[in-house]
Image (cartoon, rainbow, N blue to C red):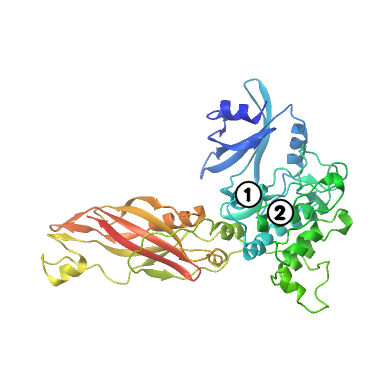
């Protein structure tokens, strides 16, 4: 049974009469992943991974899922349900986890992360790894495809966690993310340190470091990786596990100023030691939201002036509230006779009186996301306003480069209220364009009534 066979045959089927296979999300030679839905009150999206029971690591997965069922951390993907099933006489094991809206591995091919983004990304990643290590587990599979955003929070995958001190339980094709000791040695926190070093290089360089494990040489960090991350990654990538830096060392390096190698060479002797030291990180942050906020900035059409909303404070473990409601201070102006100066000021024409905004709802953006925006990130939402002044529908005219900011803009737009437009003294429906400009120093919304 291959992932391709699962993908081709089973979309539209239901697992255990409770998990519909709604969409193919991807997979590997040994598994397939689908979009599903958690039924019941407040139903929401989830991901279900199907593994043929005859595969090399199917039983190991069942044991591992049971061992880690009690794990609960805000930056570790939740596992909702695991079990066995049979589809078309084929025995399967499966796990249902949180649904990830975006993956770090989808960002890196488009552009490298900035050093500021990497610095913030490390906070929740380290926090989750500290949590696992303190409870006798090792992640064992850390890489960009396992650093995700779920529910607006940066998390690492949680359905393949290994038990520290034991050999790796899951079948894998070895890659640069796997430490030299993985094939034969016990899993230890040092395995995650190695994987983190590779991930750092890839995030900043768009490519993982070249490495041939059979030469027993350590990977070389490219010159393009700035300090302190170059030094940090090199310390993570020591061949012997006992020579690698620790997660606490990585956290210390995260607080050092960023420098190029040329500027480092000009520093006087007595600089920071090669081995980094510091205490563990505890704070959580909505970090990949900031990473994802600036993927493909692109210009749009100019629009009239608007109201500015300052960025909200950074949050810890939970995402920012989607919107902030703000009523208009100016009362709606009643229509006047056609041709009068007051009517002209409101945009009248041949008995048509333009509508006005009576209540604005501003997106509430995490400060950590706003701080990384370069220039302006623009989202345009088209809203249909009924004759009662309420919105009857909202769609994207241009969603922009980020799902996160697009979602905030759409949610905010749906809460706006208007004085309806009038034609010959009768209230009518209209269409408005709301242009959201997200910048570092705040958010502007420019409303334009495009009809009637």
Crowd around label 2: few <14 · some 14–19 · many ≥20 (10 Å): many
The residue identified by callout 1 is 105
Q: Secondary structure at mark 1?
A: helix
Q: Of 418 and 100, which appears nearest the observer?
A: 100
The image quadrant of residue 378 is bottom left
Crowd around label 1: few <14 · some 14–19 · many ≥20 (10 Å): some
Q: Quadrant of the C terminus?
A: bottom left
At which x and y percent is residue 58? Answer: 74, 32
Q: Quadrant of the N terminus?
A: top right
Q: Of 415 and 2, which appears nearest the observer?
A: 2
Numbered circles on residues, count: 2
The residue identified by callout 2 is 199
Label 2 or label 1, whichever comes before in sequence order: 1
At which x and y percent is residue 45? Answer: 54, 43
At which x and y percent is residue 276? Answer: 81, 67
Whether residue 170 is visible here, answered yes or no, is yes
């Amino acid at each position: 049974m291959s992932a391709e066979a699962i993908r081709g045959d089973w979309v539209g089927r239901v697992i255990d009469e409770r998990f519909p296979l709604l969409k193919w999300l991807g997979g590997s030679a040994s598994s397939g992943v689908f979009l599903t839905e958690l039924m019941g009150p407040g139903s929401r999206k989830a991901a279900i991974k199907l593994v043929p029971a005859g595969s090399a690591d199917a039983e190991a997965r069942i044991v591992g899922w049971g061992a880690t069922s009690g794990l609960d951390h805000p930056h570790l993907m939740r596992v909702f349900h695991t079990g066995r099933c049979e589809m078309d006489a084929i025995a399967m094991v499966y796990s249902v986890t949180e649904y990830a809206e975006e993956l770090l591995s989808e960002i890196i091919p488009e552009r490298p992360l900035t050093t500021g983004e990497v610095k913030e990304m490390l906070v929740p990643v380290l926090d989750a790894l500290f949590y696992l290590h303190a409870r006798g587990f090792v992640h064992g599979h850390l890489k960009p495809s396992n650093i995700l955003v779920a529910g607006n929070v940066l998390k690492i995958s949680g359905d393949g966690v290994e038990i520290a001190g034991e050999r790796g339980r899951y079948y894998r094709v070895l890659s640069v993310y796997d430490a030299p000791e993985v094939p034969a040695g016990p899993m230890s926190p040092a395995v995650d340190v190695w994987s983190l070093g590779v991930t750092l290089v890839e995030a900043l360089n768009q490519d993982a470091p070249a490495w041939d494990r059979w030469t027993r040489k350590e990977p070389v960090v490219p010159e393009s990786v700035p300090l302190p991350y170059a030094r940090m990654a090199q310390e993570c990538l020591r061949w012997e596990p006992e020579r690698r830096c620790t997660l606490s060392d990585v956290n210390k390096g995260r607080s050092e100023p960023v420098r190029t190698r040329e500027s480092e060479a000009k520093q006087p002797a007595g600089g920071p030691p090669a081995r980094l030291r510091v205490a563990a990180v505890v704070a959580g942050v909505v970090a990949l939201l900031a990473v994802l906020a600036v993927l493909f900035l692109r210009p749009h059409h100019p629009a009239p002036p608007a109201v500015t909303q300052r960025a909200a404070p950074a949050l810890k473990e939970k995402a920012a509230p989607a919107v902030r409601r703000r009523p208009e201070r100016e009362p709606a102006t009643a229509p006047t006779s056609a041709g009068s100066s007051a009517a002209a000021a409101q945009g009248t024409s041949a008995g048509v009186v333009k509508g006005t905004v009576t209540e604005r709802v501003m997106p509430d953006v995490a400060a950590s996301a706003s701080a990384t925006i370069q220039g302006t990130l623009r989202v345009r939402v088209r809203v249909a306003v009924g004759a009662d002044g309420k919105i009857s529908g909202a769609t994207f005219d241009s969603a922009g480069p980020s799902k996160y900011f697009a979602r905030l803009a759409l949610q905010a737009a749906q809460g706006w209220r208007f004085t309806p437009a009038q034609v010959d003294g009768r209230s009518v429906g209209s269409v408005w364009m709301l242009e959201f400009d997200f910048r570092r120093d705040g958010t502007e919304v420019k409303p334009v009534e495009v009809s009637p």
